[in-house]
């Protein structure tokens, strides 16, 4: 869920990051469902992205899908831009109550 650079190594060029969830051992059906819905939220949020789209529509779409299955969204975690600075702007909130553009 959280990640970072393990040392003080300076990154060069453009960079972003990504993550993937892997199951280890016996995993309950409820956890499998959570991971499935979470991955679907990623795709629903990404589908909103296009030139001129409002950032808040991404969070709205993610929240709507998660809530259909009884889940919520942690409003302290955000998506971010890709550039020469790691975790650069814009910040993309994953919840519907975002006041972002």
Image (cartoon, rainbow, N blue to C red):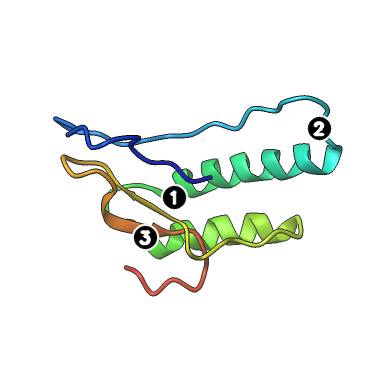
Residue placed most toward the observer, 51 or 72: 72
The residue beneath circle 1 is 48
Q: Is residue 12 left or right of residue 55?
A: left
Q: Is residue 23 left or right of residue 100?
A: right
Q: Secondary structure at mark 1?
A: helix
The residue beneath circle 2 is 27
Classify 33 as above or below 54: above
Q: Residues within 10 Å of mark 2 (few under 14, many from 20)?
A: few
Query: Which quarter of the rendering shows the C terminus?
Result: bottom left
- Rendered residue at 48%/46% (across/down): 2
Q: Residues within 10 Å of mark 1 (few under 14, many from 20)?
A: some
Looking at the rendered image, the disc whose residue lies closer to the viewer, 2 or 3, is 2
Disc 3 and disc 1 in contact, CB within 8 angstroms: no
Q: Residues within 10 Å of mark 3 (few under 14, many from 20)?
A: many
The residue beneath circle 3 is 55
Looking at the rendered image, the disc whose residue lies closer to the viewer, 3 or 1, is 3
Classify 51 as above or below 74: above
Label whose residue precedes the other's in the sequence (3 or 1)? 1
Quadrant hosting residue 15: top left
């Amino acid at each position: 869920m959280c990640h970072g650079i393990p040392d003080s190594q300076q990154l060069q060029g453009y960079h972003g990051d990504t993550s993937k969830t892997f199951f280890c051992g016996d995993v309950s059906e409820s956890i499998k469902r959570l991971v499935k819905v979470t991955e679907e939220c990623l795709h629903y949020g990404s589908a909103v992205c296009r030139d001129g789209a409002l950032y808040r529509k991404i969070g709205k779409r993610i929240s709507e899908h998660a809530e259909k299955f009884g889940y919520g969204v942690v409003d302290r975690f955000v998506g971010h831009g890709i550039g020469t600075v790691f975790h650069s702007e814009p910040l993309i909130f994953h919840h519907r109550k975002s006041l972002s553009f």
